[in-house]
Image (cartoon, grey):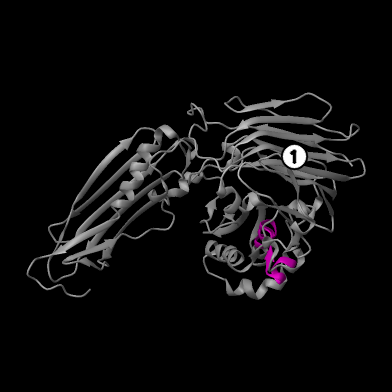
Amino acid sequence: MNRIFKILAAVALFSVFSSPFSVSYAQDAEYNLIRRTYKVNTDGTMDISFRKEIKLLRNRAITAYADKGETFILYNPATDRLTINESYTIRKDGSRVQTPQNAFIDQLPSQCTDCGRYNGIRERVVVHTALEYDCIIVLDYTIHRQGSYLDEALVLVEDCPVKKYEVIVDLPKDSEQSIGYTVAHGDFKIQTLKDKHTFHQIATDLPQKYIDNYLPAAETLYPTVNISCGKRPSDLAESSDEKLPEAIYTVGELHDNDQLTYATNIRNYVLDNIHTTDFPLSLVGYKRSSAKETFLSGCGTPADKKRLVAAMLREAGFGAEEYDNGVHVTVHEDGRPMTYNLSTDRKRPARLDGAAIDEQRTIDISRDLIWDGPRVGGSYRQMTLPTENGSISIDPAFLTSVRKAPLKVRNCNEKYHYTIALPRTPKHTLVKPVDISRTEKGIGTIRICIKQLPTGQIDVVRELSIDVKDGIVTPKQYKAFRRMMQDWTTYKTVTIRAEKGKPIMGS
């Protein structure tokens, strides 16, 4: 069997950072060492070894984090043999305490509950003992796995600092292989060694992950090693002709005369009714279940569910093909075939294939509203403007005053014009007109105008355009962006006041 081996060690850094992790936090723990070793054997098996040495610095690392006081090892007894090589704690005084045998517990992983066909997978819980301030936990284990295909993405940054992170890969010398790796320049100390190993990389003095909301994908933010080796299993290939007659009645109940709505209903059914069992596909040899098995069992991995969506769409008469993040579905609009991208991991609106994502974020709404706001004290009433489908969803409450990490946002162009009819009696007056209009270079524009018309109606104009490069708000842009989001949210409410001396009708 030909083995194709590719390693790409990529660090995607933003050039605007003077130091990508210049913010410092109090550390609860730190890794002295993390070592991951992958060895492909000539008999078609693989040995995956992991070693960690972590020092606990504060009480939170002992009591608040399950991944510090305990270690969880996923494995499949049907294909894996797990061996604990070492497990002990070095106390502050230098004494060593071995982990007792009753501290190794096998249990069903939470990811595999409510899904019978995956109930054979196990999670080995290692309950570490003799924990105290400044102790060091040492754990070393190996999984001997049947099969030689591997597809791993290793993010070389953890939730606490790492002094040394080592990745080793070994392949048989007589195997066909193609090796390529790149290391981008930056503040990360990463060294690729030329030694007896097929691949050997060491990263040192790695800071912890950012503690922020709305972060970009980890693989674009932190040092990442992508490992792919061996022959790709055939059942990972797309099943372009799979249908599902068992779902014919379900598909019929989801029917809609609008074809795109019909296809979306099918996708939503799978998301709402098929339980997700989310674990690495390596545990099951990268095999997916058939659409029939997933449908009848009511559960499956994200890959299983994507396959099911495609099969149900075909059963409904659509052309459907799987792709990385979802399903391409072809519908007919005015007699013309149109292909849409339909996400299968969340309920995103369908996107026309080939259209830029940002084009789908254009919203232009103009409509009349009837006042719908309760009293908030005395003669005052307050109404919150509606949240339209697909509108920007950045909550300023989650935006800290100081931030060193980049922020991921979907670029948008939103325009809203509302005319609000107020209660007839008594007469009401807008409490505080709003007139904001500004442009932030490299970010976008915001305009909010709330005023009362001579007719007594409230006129609301809200316009927001976000256009940042690659959808990333840099630390230099963050302060201005945060202010825009604060204004966008703050002025989403309208407050009116009844004339004095007149009764307030209704609530």
Whole-percent x, y for residue 9 in the image = 68, 32
For label 1, the crowd category at 10 Å Cα-Cα, with few meaning under 14, some 14 to 19 and many 20 or more, is some
Residue 265 in the figure: left or right of residue 403: right
Left or right: residue 462 compared with residue 195: left
Residue type at tag 1: Arg
- As drawn, is 387 to the left or to the right of 335? left
Instruction: Return the residue nearer the eye: 188 or 7.
Output: 188
All told, the count of numbered labels is 1
* Residue position marked by numbered label 1 in the rendering: 36
Tell me where residue 228 appears, x and y as whole percent.
76, 40
Residue at 34 percent across and 60 percent down: it is 386
In this picture, which residue range is highlighted in magenta? 293-311
Determine which quarter of the picture holds residue 78.
Answer: bottom right
Quarter of the figure that contains the N terminus: top right
> In the structure shown, which secondary structural element does the residue marked by tag 1 occupy?
strand
Residue 62 is a magenta residue: no
Judge whether residue 305 is colored magenta: yes
Outermost residue on the left side: it is 501
Q: Residue at x 42, y 39 (%)?
A: 467
Give percent across and percent down for residue 422. Answer: 19, 66
Name the residue nearer the viewer: 463 or 301.
301
Quadrant placement of the C terminus: bottom left
Q: Main secondary structure of the magenta part?
A: helix
Is residue 152 in view? yes
Q: Please state the horizontal and vertical placement of residue 144, each as a whole percent of the image.
A: 85, 48
- Taking the view exactly as shown, the residue that stands out farthest to the front is 93
| Residue nearer the viewer, 24 or 399 | 24
Res. 339 visible in picture: no
Residue 165 as seen in the image, left or right of residue 285: left
Which of the 4 image quadrants contains residue 473?
A: top left
Compared to residue 326, the image places residue 190 above or below, namely above
